[in-house]
Image (cartoon, grey):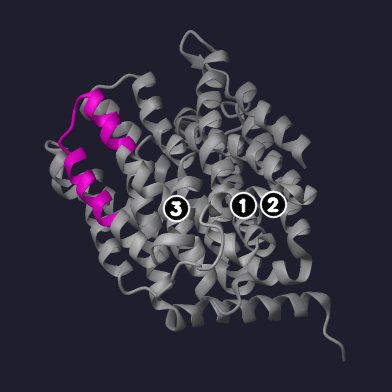
Amino acid sequence: MAESQAEQTQKGLWDEMGVAIRLVFSQPKLSAMMFLQYAIWGAWAVALAGYLVKHCGFNGQQVGWIYAVFPLANLVVPFTAGQIADRWLPSQVAIALFHLLGGVLFFVLGFQHSFGPMIVLMFAYCLLFAPTLALTNSLAFRNLGDPQRDFGPIRMWGTIGWIVSNLILSFMRQQFGTEKPEFIDLFMLSGALSILMGLLSFTLPHTPPSTGSDPLAFREAFVLFKNRSYLFFFILAFIVATELQLYYILTNPYLQVIGPSVGISSQTAPAWQTVAQIAEIFVIALLLPYALPRWGVRKCMLIGIIAWPIRYVVFAVTYPLYTTVPAMVWLTIASLALHGFCYVFFFVVAFIYTDMVAPKDIRASAQSLINVAVLGIGSFIGSVFAGWLADFFTTDKTTNYGAVFAVPAVITALCA
């Protein structure tokens, strides 16, 4: 008897789970690379704003500018990371040097409490860290036998690293307190992880630079815009990236407003937010390897884009109802799981699609170029837009989050 569609799907998912488990053993160094790459990022990206306000006494604008240096650094990536990976240094050596230097800078940053030195050193660090995002993707693509099938499970370890580093940071704060955060807090943790990543990178598969072609590889990446489909995708990725920042910046304060009605405090809100990362692991490890070969890039991206307005609509509808219908808060928590589809089926697929359409000689530069749209211009504008939007709908220190989240709901719905 022929298998039903449900049985075939279940069998396919179990097959892909086997791929994810196998890769941990067959590609342990690539798995560890992704784990540490995103553990470093997660250790500072989530908690930095609170650290700057509590321990440095910075105001909102100062915190915003310090966060803005990361997307600004990403604007330089096509002229640095792509060149280094495509032409000058083996990828694993470039990653090692960037992380070793970045680790030293983080140890220095831990002892800074003035805005001037902090923003200068943070920008210097971001100039070192930003290239490694594209370089690790490029190195993984070049050393996987079947990138379309295997990149998702490998990238899953990055999400696990992000979660683990935040759990470690919370443990450190609970065990050692925060009287002298420069010795035990996020900069020290990120610095130690960066040094470890730098040392590990020297053991990664040798990935030499390309030879025998134009030394200005980044210019060749712009040739991709002659492909109308890729140009449309690039513009779409930019727009969606601006709305991603609204999720990252505004979700935590939103949960602190609506959460107390069901017992969620400011201390436990970050833990509840890991629902998003747990869902991301499931989607990237199981669903993406199954869906991409069967449904193709276009359908996977469409699923990812549709998930965005659904999540923001839930956020917007919950705000006016959370006091009278507390169960709506749990619906908002559940909607965080859509982040797995929002991020993986759009942004991870974007990296895979870019690798598919780019000529071999310029793939690292092409990865850097898409990072410009997602982590550069899009993130910078999105960060500024998120702050402006929250202020626009704030009266007497009370933010109307229903109106705030209605805006990205409309924008992402138009993208779909």
> Label 1: few (<14), some or many (≥20) within 10 Å?
many
Magenta segment: 99-123
Q: Amino acid at mark 3?
A: Ala
For label 1, the residue is 221
Taking the image as shown, residue 48 lies to the left or right of residue 393, namely left
How far apart marks 2 and 3 lie (CA) works out to 18 Å
Question: In the rendered view of the protein, which quadrant contains the N terminus?
Answer: bottom right
Label of residue 413 in the image? none
Q: Is residue 91 above or below residue 12?
A: above
Q: Earlier in the sequence, mark 3 or mark 1?
A: 3
> Label 3: few (<14), some or many (≥20) within 10 Å?
many
Q: Amino acid at mark 2?
A: Leu
Report whether residue 220 is seen.
yes
Residue 160 at x, y = what percent?
A: 43, 61
Closer to the camera in the image, 389 or 37 = 37
Q: Is residue 161 above or below residue 322?
A: below
Callout 2–callout 1 Cβ contact below 8 Å: yes
Q: Secondary structure at mark 3?
A: helix
Q: Is residue 16 above or below residue 346?
A: below
Task: Give me the residue at 74% from left, 75% from top.
Answer: 9
For label 2, the residue is 224
Question: Quick check: is 118 in the magenta stretch?
Answer: yes
Task: Give me the residue at 55% from left, 50% from top.
Answer: 218
Task: Give me the residue at 51% from left, 25% from top.
Answer: 384
For label 3, the residue is 81
